Image: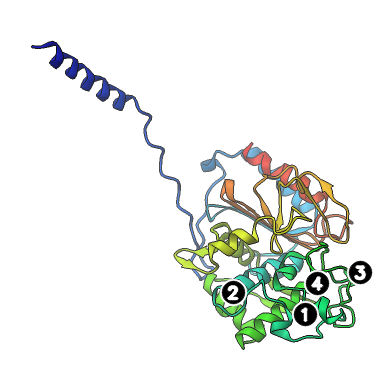
């Protein structure tokens, strides 16, 4: 046998050996689960099957009960890992979302845009007419739907009143971040653009498509949603899956990405009515102070959140394919959307898997 043939055989042998030594392909990631539109069944997953620590469950439950919680759910890949109720609350009980429901309005705004009913870069007065504020007309016309989504309307934020007389000029739109109920004007925009009532449009385009229950009601100057804890979890699951429910695109991914990333350069921790963890700095409601670091240092950096008064919470963690829901009464005496409750709660939650 010639030397060249021997070298060829040796080379082929080495290639085969190299192929045999390759690491096996990773196991296919578990697919995300969507519960049926009826709430009667919902797949579960045990703490043990995830490799989490059973010993960390009771300290978490004790803390939740101590802090006046009513409903609590953890989903991983859509399956229920923990579902607990306290103080007479149960799976059938509705509870208010408070400002956590702002994210519902943000989602509906995206849906209206993808249906070509609105463009968020257009001025608000294009849809609801001029005179919806007391600002000079030139200043009012600077305010776009996107400014309402990002809390950069420039309108006075010292009152929650959204009547025209209370919506006075403070700064040019886009130059100042201030948490304000004026975002509810987006609902008026959608009503005018769609020719439908807010409830009809919301129920048809979002609620019924993902099997939520619940209703809107008016509280003061705000529009508040109320539902079961599981319905809140369904919305969190939709958002975890970037706006898709199974194969049904409820919200397009482009808008979803805009909504869940920094939306302006003043408050890095804010998207389109979503709070964003893990940014270099952030602002809080009723404050013009810039705070350095992550909003919730004990939580994953990629987490984004719907935060409501009295500690109504939707936490979405893409890296862990996890949604966490908390409903209940105020945890502490602090009545803002964010309190030190979040930091300690995430210390308890992360103890499950660390």
Q: CA distance from mark 1 to mark 4?
A: 12 Å
Within 10 Å of disc 4 (Cα), the crowding (few <14, some 14-19, many 20+) is some
The residue at the far bottom in this view is 195
**Can the viewer see residue 85?**
no
Contact between labelled residues 4 and 2, with CB atoms less than 8 Å apart: no
The residue at the far right in this view is 158
| Disc 1: which residue | 218
| Disc 4: which residue | 181
Contact between labelled residues 3 and 1, with CB atoms less than 8 Å apart: no
| Disc 2: which residue | 113
Front residue of 33 and 253: 253
Where, quadrant-wise, is the C terminus in this rendering? Answer: top right
- Say which element carries label 3: loop
- Observer-side mark, 2 or 4, equals 2
Find residue 158 and name its label. Answer: 3
Within 10 Å of disc 1 (Cα), the crowding (few <14, some 14-19, many 20+) is few
Q: CA distance from mark 1 to mark 3?
A: 20 Å
Contact between labelled residues 3 and 2, with CB atoms less than 8 Å apart: no
The residue drawn where x is 65% and y is 75% is 214
Residue 196: percent from the left, percent from the top?
Answer: 62, 87
First in sequence: mark 2 or mark 3?
Answer: 2
Vertical side of 169 occupied by 14: above or below: above
Residue 242: percent from the left, percent from the top?
Answer: 55, 59
- Say which element carries label 1: strand
Front residue of 224 and 261: 261
């Amino acid at each position: 046998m010639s030397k060249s043939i021997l070298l060829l055989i040796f080379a082929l042998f080495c290639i085969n050996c190299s192929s045999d030594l390759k690491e096996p392909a990773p196991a296919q990631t578990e697919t995300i689960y969507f519960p049926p539109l009826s709430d009667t069944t919902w797949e579960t997953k045990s703490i043990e099957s995830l490799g989490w620590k059973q010993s960390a469950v009771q300290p978490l439950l004790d803390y939740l009960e101590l802090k006046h919680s009513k409903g609590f759910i953890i989903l991983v890949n859509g399956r229920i890992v923990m579902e607990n109720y306290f103080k007479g609350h149960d799976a059938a009980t509705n509870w208010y979302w408070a400002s956590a429901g702002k994210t519902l309005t943000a989602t509906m705004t995206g849906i209206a845009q993808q249906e070509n009913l609105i463009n968020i870069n257009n001025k608000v007065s294009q849809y609801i007419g001029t005179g919806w504020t007391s600002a000079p007309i030139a200043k009012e016309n600077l305010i776009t739907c996107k400014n309402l989504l990002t809390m950069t309307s420039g309108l006075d934020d010292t009152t929650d009143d959204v009547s025209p007389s209370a919506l006075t000029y403070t700064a040019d739109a886009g130059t100042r971040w201030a948490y304000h109920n004026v975002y509810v004007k987006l609902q008026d925009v959608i009503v005018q653009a769609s020719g439908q009532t807010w409830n009809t449009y919301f129920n048809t385009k979002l609620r019924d498509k993902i099997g939520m229950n619940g209703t809107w009601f008016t509280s003061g100057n705000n529009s508040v949603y109320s539902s079961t804890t599981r319905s809140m979890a369904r919305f969190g699951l939709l958002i975890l899956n970037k706006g898709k429910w199974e194969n049904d695109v409820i919200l397009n991914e482009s808008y979803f990405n805009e909504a869940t990333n920094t939306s302006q350069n003043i408050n890095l921790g804010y998207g389109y009515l979503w709070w964003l963890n893990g940014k270099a700095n952030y602002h809080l409601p009723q404050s013009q102070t810039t705070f350095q670091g992550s909003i919730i240092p004990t939580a994953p950096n990629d987490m984004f959140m719907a935060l409501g008064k009295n500690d109504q919470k939707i936490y979405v963690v893409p890296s862990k394919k996890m949604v966490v829901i908390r409903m209940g009464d105020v945890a502490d005496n602090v009545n803002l959307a964010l309190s030190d409750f979040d930091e300690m709660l995430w210390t308890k939650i992360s103890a499950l898997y660390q």
